[in-house]
Image (tube, rainbow, N blue to C red):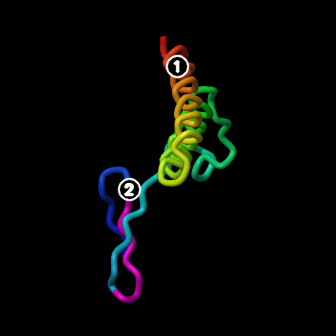
Amino acid sequence: MKESISDGCIHFNENKSAHLVLPYENENMFGLFKKKSEKEKLEAQYDALIKKSYELSHSNRAESDKVQAQAQEVLKKIEALED
């Protein structure tokens, strides 16, 4: 049994439980082969640096401050790309 809902479908299995299936906008499944833009790469780098800075803040404050400064430099690059 299958019923349509907007752009997706609801599938019912033999146990009568429903699963909503939505179509993907991208041809590549989950964007596996999509190349990251420069902005996306910088955002990922920024996130990693902020996380590392936070983790270091519990044990080595000076190193945490250095990593935080690196993150701020990456953030400046991101903001420059947005202009």
Q: Residue 27 carries which label?
A: none
User: 34 or 69, which lies in front?
Assistant: 69
5 relative to 74 in the view: left or right: left
User: 63 or 2, which lies in front?
Assistant: 63
Residue 49, by quadrant, is top right
Q: Name the residue that disc number 2 marks.
A: 8
Q: What element carries label 2?
A: strand
Q: How crowded is mark 2: few (under 14 residues within 10 Å), some or many (20 or more)?
A: few
Which residue, as the protein is rendered here, is positioned at the far bottom? 15
Q: Earlier in the sequence, mark 2 or mark 1?
A: 2
- Point out the image quarter for the N terminus: bottom left
Amino acid marked by disc 1: Lys
Nearer mark to the viewer, of 2 and 1: 1
Q: Name the residue that disc number 1 marks.
A: 76
Find out whether residue 54 is within the magenta segment.
no
Q: In this view, does 14 lie above or below 37?
A: below
Q: Is residue 34 above or below residue 55?
A: above
Amino acid marked by disc 2: Gly
Q: Is mark 1 on a helix, strand or loop?
A: helix
